[in-house]
Image (cartoon, rainbow, N blue to C red):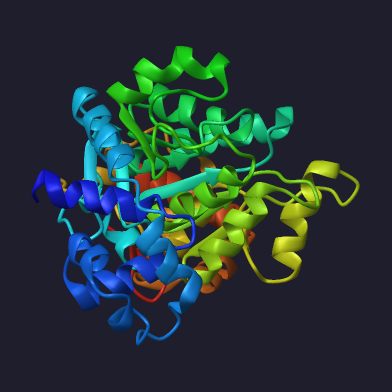
Amino acid sequence: MSDQEKIYLLALHRLNLIGDSTSKKLLEIFGSAEAIFKEKSEKLSKINGLGVKRIKSLKNDVDLDGAERELKFIEDNQIDFLFFKDKDYPERLKHCIDGPIILFQKGNIDLHRKPTLSIVGTRKITTHGLKFTEKLVEELSIFKPVIVSGFAYGTDITAQKSAIKNNLQTIGCLAHGLNQIYPKVHKKYQPEVLANGGFMTDFCSDDKFDRNNFLKRNRIIAGLSEATIVIESAEKGGSLVTADIANSYNREVFALPGRHSDKMSIGCNNLIKKQKAMMITSAADIVYMLGWQIDSKPKPSNQIELFVDLTADETIVVEALKQLQKTELDPLALKCNIPTFKLSTILLNLELKGLVRPLPGKQFELI
């Protein structure tokens, strides 16, 4: 793509009255951003939904000088300029109608065929929420997921620090341009995030820092991932908006339940109660519902005997699977006399040890 077209794309991107879905429609019709701005008003007026105000904006509010300055900032700071039709543009975000036409990216991000999870929640995370998040990321690390969040206080930074600790990629989706870091206290984590993933935003370096930016940013968090996990939330909060967006994209949503009297569990409990999210109590729930599998290599026939550290419950499950062979969760729970919620965790542990694998149809078998 030429620098000239990038400048026109940036100018289009910066128009307040022209959103991403409208921009995509115009680009499809006219073929390029430059052609959109050079088209006559008469032809633009024939496009359904454009309207007089938007046409006036396309003719009078164009800031090519500002767009040119932004392109120079991007080039000077080694920022990736991702157009929504580019092969490097995140695949899942391409399928979101309001995904940004331009995405700015910095770091070492690789989303190619990788499991990707968004972890969000309150900025006032409790000790319970913090420990659960850390344990969740640690247990899921065997699958090498990319952890996406908003780099904010509380849940966000807990998830991203946990990802770094477990040598996972993490992406911070920012509500401002890449010329700054908010909150400033998190600047100390910036080098580690850049080395273990990076940052994404659709805000330009000179965009006004506004509270509403966080809500707009949430569509990228939800759009990048196959599932969004809400750790804790009050009755209202930005993470609930992210959950709603994920639902609108037909992505999976999970929520951590809590006591009805806990303020920071109200939002999650409501998501579960209204069937807007599935309940999560362990990493096994994620693995089971998303159908994740560990790539396994052929193992010797005496593989089970090599694991002398099997717990009593794990041994019961292994012996039951020897008899049942392929089986679903409920029959296995009945056979083992183990509650399903507990059995899910045991199966995940056996999968991590390379002894069990999930199958289509929510079945399991010994390897």
Query: Which residue is at 23% across, 52% downward?
Result: 8
Q: Position of residue 83 (x, y in %)?
A: 23, 53
Q: Tell me, yes or no, if residue 363 can be seen here.
A: no
Q: Quadrant of the C terminus?
A: bottom left
Q: Please count the marks in the image.
A: 0
Viewer-nearest residue: 325 or 244 = 244
Residue 56, percent from left and from top? 43, 67
- The residue nearer to you, when weighing 345 against 285, is 285
Residue 324 picture quarter: bottom left
Q: Please indicate, yes or no, whether residue 66 appears anywhere in the rendered image.
A: yes
Q: Is residue 136 left or right of residue 236?
A: left
Say which quarter of the image contains residue 106. Answer: top left
Q: Is residue 295 above or below residue 140?
A: below
Q: Position of residue 215 (x, y in %)?
A: 59, 50
Q: Report the residue at 67% width, 71% height from top.
A: 275
Q: From this viewpoint, which residue is outermost toward the left?
A: 2
**Image x and y of residue 289, in percent:** 47, 63
* 123 relative to 254, above or below: above
User: Residue 345 or 312: which is nearer the viewer?
Assistant: 345
Q: Nearer the viewer, residue 144 or 244?
A: 244
Q: In this rendering, is residue 97 above or below 255?
A: below
Residue at the (63%, 56%) spot, across then down: 241
Query: Which residue is at a point 32% across and 60% down the rendered structure image?
Result: 92
